[in-house]
Amino acid sequence: MKTFIRAFFRTLRIVLGPVMLLKERLTRPAGVQRTPTAQAAIDQQCQSLALYQFSTCPFCIKVRQEMRRLSLPIEKRDAQHHAANRNDLLQGSGATQVPCLKITEANGQTRWLKDSGAIVAYLRERFSAAAI
């Protein structure tokens, strides 16, 4: 029975994955337009961030859409197909839950933000037009 359930969900992922990626591409939001100086400052701040994600995870898609809307060039690390990224995620956050945002503070300390809603709220608070 366990094998059947795993096969069912694996097949479901194989069928729905491309559909979800197509929907993400078709509903891509327009990014925030900033002056080149302001965007350069944002780009600099984003170098201390990394998003651990799976390509077809709906919660990861939600975060990536917000990153596009806010024009944030945050590094995306595939924790599904790259074992090194998955191990980094497990070592740092204590779980392989995605999406997970790695935040490296100016003093060198690292924080891990795990929930998609919390990540989106953090990005909006830190990078919205009003916050800049």
Image: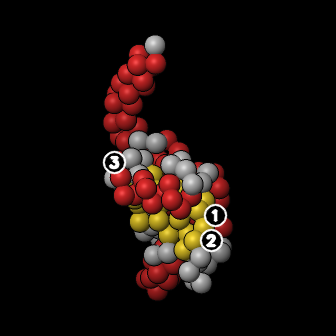
Relative to 4, 120 lies left or right: right
Is disc 1 placed on a helix, strand or loop? Answer: helix
The amino acid pointed to by label 3 is His
Are circles 1 and 2 on residues that touch, CB within 8 Å?
Answer: yes
Is disc 3 placed on a helix, strand or loop? Answer: loop
Tell me where residue 17 sits by quadrant.
Answer: top left
Seen at 41% across and 66% down, the residue is 75
Distance of label 1 from label 2 (alpha carbons)? 6 Å
Seen at 41% across and 42% down, the residue is 56
Distance of label 1 from label 3 (alpha carbons)? 26 Å
- Residue where numbered disc 1 is placed: 122
The amino acid pointed to by label 2 is Arg
Measured as percent of width and height from the top left, residue 93 is found at 56, 58
Q: Quadrant of the C terminus?
A: bottom right
Q: Is residue 33 above or below residue 18?
A: below
Going from the N terminus, do you reach mark 1 or mark 3 first?
A: 3
Relative to 54, 124 lies left or right: right
Q: Which-is-in-front pick, marks 2 and 3?
A: 3
Distance of label 2 from label 3 (alpha carbons)? 30 Å
Q: Which residue lies furthest to the top in this view?
A: 1
Which labelled disc corresponds to residue 126?
2
The amino acid pointed to by label 1 is Tyr
Which labelled disc corresponds to residue 81?
3
Q: Can residue 68 be seen in this view?
A: no
